[in-house]
Amino acid sequence: MCPDSRNPDSSERPHTPAPSSPAEGSDGCDLCDLPLPSVPITDPDVDGTYCCRGCLEVARTLERRDDGPDEAAVRSRLDGADAAGGRDLDDLDGEDAFLAVDGMHCSTCEAFLESVAEREAGVLGATASYATDTIRIVYDPDRLAADDLPEIVSGYGYTAADRSGADGDAGSDDGLARLLLGGFFGMMVMVWYVLFLYPTYFDLEPVVAFGGYELAFLSANIWAFTSFILFYTGYPILRGAYVSLRAGRPNMDLLVATAALGSYGYSAVAIVLGESHLYFDVTVAVVLVVTAGTHYERAVKRRATGLLSELTERQVDEARLESGETVPLEAVEPGDRLLVRPGERVPLDGEVLEGSAAVDESLVTGESLPVRKTPGDELRGGTVVTDAPIVLGVGDEAESTLDRLVSLLWSIQSARPGVQRLADKLATVFVPLVVALAVSTAAVLLATGSSPSTALLIGLTVVIVSCPCALGLATPLAIAAGVQAAAKRGIVVAAETIFEDAPDVDVVVLDKTGTLTTGKMAVEGVHVVDGTDSDELLRRAGAVESLSEHPIAAAVVEAAPVAAADGIGDPATGTDGSAVDSFERADRGVSGVVDGDRVVVGHPDFCRERGLSVPDSLESPIEDARAAGRVPVGVGWDGRTRGVVAVGDSEREELDAALESLSSGREIVVLTGDEGPAAERFRAVDGVDEVFAGVPPEAKAETVDRLRRRGTVAMVGDGSNDAPALAAADVGIAMGGGTQLATDAADAVIVGDDLEAVGETLEITASTHRRIRQNLGWAFCYNAVAIPLAVAGLLNPLFAAVAMAASSLLVVLNSSRSLR
């Protein structure tokens, strides 16, 4: 059955620019860079030329309302400038590679990995994002092989792999092993402290008495066990500190490492000098507490991620030649003839050579209604042929629109800067201040006649008392609490940077199909002429439509009095078991004999072509359905159209409540590839401030990027066509019923596919952000009191460690409180 025949006005669909016919003298659309049609879309009041009406309207609206940075600035998020030289990687003459990197956890990691990659001969430029664990490398294929690239950026605790096949949980077992082994050796260290060293610090009789030789042996054991804990369990912390020094950006790892290494170094020197006051316990406590907090955060995130079901992989890796032979996609050449059967995904962009079929383009365009394709029409790779086989001629580029979207997504993700954690922002000032204060204190004491051991000890105390444990736990524990609270509501946090950005969201951009609507064709109303029973009309229509594969036919079948599950096995039998004789399929509808009558189902004009009159009483329901963005399907027999079934993509039941919760203090924008009534109906919805209709997939990301002039932007979507926009937004939220590409691009995924959970996501993230600030506030308030006492020599490392533990406990207790 033909979707054009059932669409109230096929001309209202978004313009699809021809991929191979750019306007002469122009590089492409001024919004999305897609090739221009032979006659570019322009308007006197809008600068530039555009590939479609949707792009022009976006440009007109945003230029009229926004006074922001120049074009180069607003495109920087998509293009991704090179960290070292400010170069645009898209301008470099080389091949692109996108790698997933395990081990990145702060903005210093980004700068470090970029510098490591660019020092390799043959690498032209690189840009990394810890928010998405992605690095983009532009390289010279004549000097470097693609397989060598992961090895270049691997090392120092980072592990790189091809982006398409990377395992998001890589390294989790190694982290657990570090913690368990560190805990085991830590207990052995603390046993000796409790039995012998702690009592001697307070001039008490030790639980176990040792002679000089035994004491030396004991000290050596403690030293060895602590060394294992520091350099094995604490390796990620030391690595982070090293990276921060290399990048010139002090972070919280540097403060923790300074305290751990300082107490370790002092104790090692003390053993050599024959001293009995050792502070290896401080090293053990700092490393294990911070490691445990970080591991707990990651474990909670992994459990939450486990809520996601396995989603269907949308990219095609094989194609079927017209002869029926299946070949790898890379073996297909431009001009090859491919056979695409009903239910199969179009492997590459091209042109229909033979056949006529309804094509579901929602995956790559977001348009809810299938589009009828006939010989000569362009086909996009990644779309789905629904009801009849076609022969496709592969285009000149032998590429897929879906693959271009994947590449665009990865490009945006690698250029997307990770939000620097609040703790790391504070550390850029706090760490140098603490280190400078400790060194200055020691220097002053030495200058005033104090012994080197006393000066060193007080300087060390200043570092230890600076509360690295509390500061190290402040963010991980609060984030873990936020992830848990979200998981209980069916929200999976995929990127913890959402806790930094989401509280400041000013603009919420909502995709239409699958987000504001259910994304599924359904019967929205049935209108019958007098004397016709609506159930009888649906029963007969369902019997005939059960033999069609069209999505609209499936909606009619589902609404029929008897469920489709009772039907289809026999191709000549309807859903209710009624025999369907002489079934016929045409471009504008279908027909078949049911109960002795030829039942015609399709466009009202198709009914007229088959000799059925359309009563005046049905004209109004037909126009109303079209005005509401729905498809009127005529059903008739015995020379007369008996009724009209309105089929459409219905709004979600929770739409009004969701918009009410989102619109409080925020601007709501609807972004869709649809045009006409299907999009216009949302302009009248309460809470919606703006609707951008007819926007091609490649332009969605640029539209979101331009909206960032107005403030922090959250994007909510579900389809692969939304993935680049989800990645380009400050906060990307994917509906759980969406595609894998969309969930990969998002910062959070709503597993239950409940639109109201979008508002709850923003609420939970805001509460988590406040909890992080509370934890950090307590830690710094404690430091404001404890550090002066340490400088004055009123605290020794042991009491500093006890105070540090007490402050850490308060952070743990605060993080354990309910967020909601």
Image (tube, helix red, strand yellow):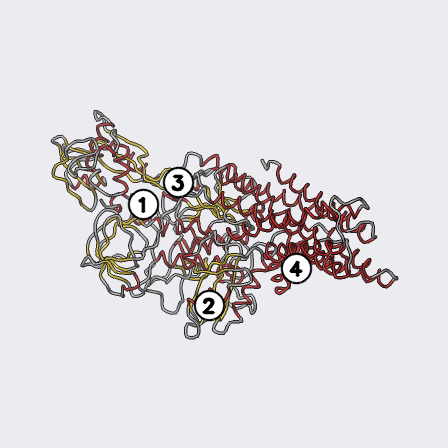
> The residue tagged with tag 4: helix, strand or loop?
loop
Q: Amino acid at mark 2?
A: Val
Q: Earlier in the sequence, mark 3 or mark 2?
A: 2
Mark number, residue 517: 3
User: Which residue in the protein does label 1 denote?
Assistant: 369
Q: Is residue 148 above or below residue 673?
A: below
Q: Earlier in the sequence, mark 4 or mark 3?
A: 4
Please identify the quarter of the rendering in which residue 618 is found.
Answer: top left
The span from disc 2 to disc 1 (Cα, nearest Å) is 39 Å
Which residue is painted at 26% across and 36% down in the image?
556
Q: Nearer the viewer, mark 1 or mark 4?
A: 4
In the rendered image, the quadrant that contains the N terminus is top left
Q: Amino acid at mark 1?
A: Leu
The span from disc 3 to disc 1 (Cα, nearest Å) is 13 Å
**Residue placed most toward the observer, 801 or 643:** 801
Q: Earlier in the sequence, mark 1 or mark 4?
A: 4
